[in-house]
Structure formats: structure tokens, C-alpha cells
Amino acid sequence: MADSDEGISRRAFLSAMAVSAVAATAAALAPLAGIEDLPTLEEFLRQHYKELTPEDKQAIMERIAEKVEDEYGIRPNVTDPQAMAGVEFAYALNIGRCIGCRRCVYACMKENNQSRNPQIQYIRVLQMRKGSINVESSDHDYSGEVPKDGFYYMPVSCHQCRKAPCVKACPVQATWQEPDGIVVIDYNWCIGCRYCMAACPYFARRFNFEKPQLPKQDLNPEMGLLSNRPRARGVVEKCHWCLHRTRNGKYPACVEVCPTGSRKFGNLLDADSEDAQIIKTKRVFVLKEEVGTLPRFYYYFNV
């Protein structure tokens, strides 16, 4: 009986300790209860995305769907498409054809549920003087009709680098590179330190200083857990090549909307794909080659 009593006491003790720990955490968070975007205790204790079981992910997606429905009155379809075997995505952009219309910018915002106020944009379209390759002296806030005489246009977004400095800079591994080359972010794991933003040579990441504002009529209900589902204040986000689309055989939104066909997207591992042929046969270059990031985003000319 002594052993049995001791076993019961040990279990009771450990159970009491667990309850006390949860209670202490809840008490610590209590003074912050009135702050918007504060994670629930369940979200606070959530594991990293890579440690989640399929059941964990399903439960999280269900909670996201419920939260979105409560806020927007629309039940979203939240999924978690995985990288496909034998696929390494790449992007090619024909500088000779881009007219600087910025339709890609706004199609991206519409697709990816980006904040309208303050406005979050993943794509910057640089207006460059012909004959110049100085990105730092370019203008991404130009206005008026385009294209303008004497200028060419260079859209810039996340380059999904093979040696991504943002991944190395993250102190909590909230961002990483997937097998198909897309660099993703676990929004629930991001601590908002912005080290990744400082590390990125392409100015491709955005930080939510305020709670993102998205009108109900602008909500895209087709959502991916690692892509365009709603983000909170205090986290970083960026282009993810519309992985909720591309992993299901579709093009990124910016590719579909381009009126000049400047944008090409495909599988580098398929020798017959358009991107693979462009890289093989066109005058191709990458932005800031000297920093050694080895991007999967290529610029090219017609000849």
C-alpha cells in the first residue's frame, strides 16, 4: 500500500503543478487582456508549425476559420497545401516588356488579404532611368501615365533566395525555406524582432506596426495557413508566391494579371518549362548578385 499511496501522491503532485503553471501563465497575461491581437493561452502555448501533427493543423485552421467568420461574416476555406515532390519554383521577369502599371501590386494585395490601412504591399515597382542600374536612385512612388519616356521598370519582391539571409537572421526559426524553394513564415511563432527585415537586401519583408485593416468586401476567403490567412499586429509578412495557389497548379496572382506577359512562373526542375528555357536561352541576371543570396527570381531581356 505504501508504494501505491506514494504513486498516487506523485501523480497528484505533478497534476497540481501543471494546473498551477497554467494558472500562473493566465494570471501573468491577465493585465494585458484589454489589448487587441493578444494571443489566446492556447495560441500562446502552440508548437512551431514544423512540430504540429495533422490533427493540430486541422484544429488551428478550424479556429482561424471561426475567427474570420466572426469578424467578417464569411466562412473561409483554410488549407495547408504542401510542397510537391520534384518541384523547385522559379520566377522570370521580362524587363523589356514591363510598363510599370502596378497591376501586379494590387492583384497581390487582393489575393493575399493585405492590410489596406496602413497599406501593405509585397511588390515594389522601381522606375529606373534608361542606362542606369542604380536601384538606390530609383523611384517606386512615381505617378502619372506609364510607361514614361526615358525610363524602364523593375518590379521587386521576395526573391526566395537559396541562401536566404532572413532565415539565418531569425532568432526563433519562425521563417524557413520549404522543399520547393518558397521561404515561409509561421505567423504565430514570429516575435516581431525584425532582424529578418534588416537582413534582406531586397527590402522584401513588411512589419505590421498596426492591426491590419481589411474591409469585409475585400476579403479573399481562399486561404493558406502559411500564406494569405489574416495576420496580426506585431508580425512580419512577405510574398510567398501565392503558395495556396501555386501548390495547386495555378499561377501567382501577379502573373495572371500582368497585361504584357512580362511575368513567367514555373518549375526549374522541368527542363521543358518556360522558366527553365528562359534561363537557358535569354540574357538573364539576378538583382544584387554580389551579396550571394542565389535568388530564384530572374530578370531577362527579349534578346
Image: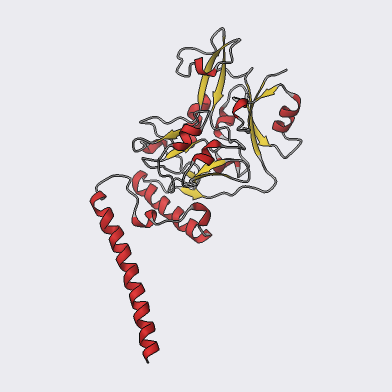
The image quarter in which residue 214 lies: top left
Can residue 267 be spotted in the picture?
Answer: yes
Q: Which is more toward the observer, 13 or 29?
A: 13
Please give left or right for residue 90 compared with residue 48 in the image: right
x 61%, y 47%: residue: 83
Q: Is residue 233 above or below residue 156?
A: below
The image quarter in which residue 213 lies: top left
Can residue 138 be spotted in the picture?
Answer: no
Q: In this view, does 252 lie above or below 100?
A: below
Query: Which image quarter holds the C terminus?
Result: top right
Q: In this view, does 187 lie above or below 204?
A: below
The image quarter in which residue 23 lies: bottom left
Query: Which image quarter holds the N terminus?
Result: bottom left
x 62%, y 19%: residue: 95
Please give left or right for residue 241 compared with residue 86 in the image: left
Number of disc labels: 0
Residue 292 screen position, x and y as percent: 62, 31
Residue 125 screen position, x and y as percent: 52, 22
* In the image, farthest residue toward the top: 149
Q: Which is more toward the observer, 187 or 271?
A: 187
The colour scheme is: secondary structure
Residue 285 screen position, x and y as percent: 66, 24
Please give left or right for residue 37 compared with residue 184 in the image: left
Residue 30 screen position, x and y as percent: 25, 54
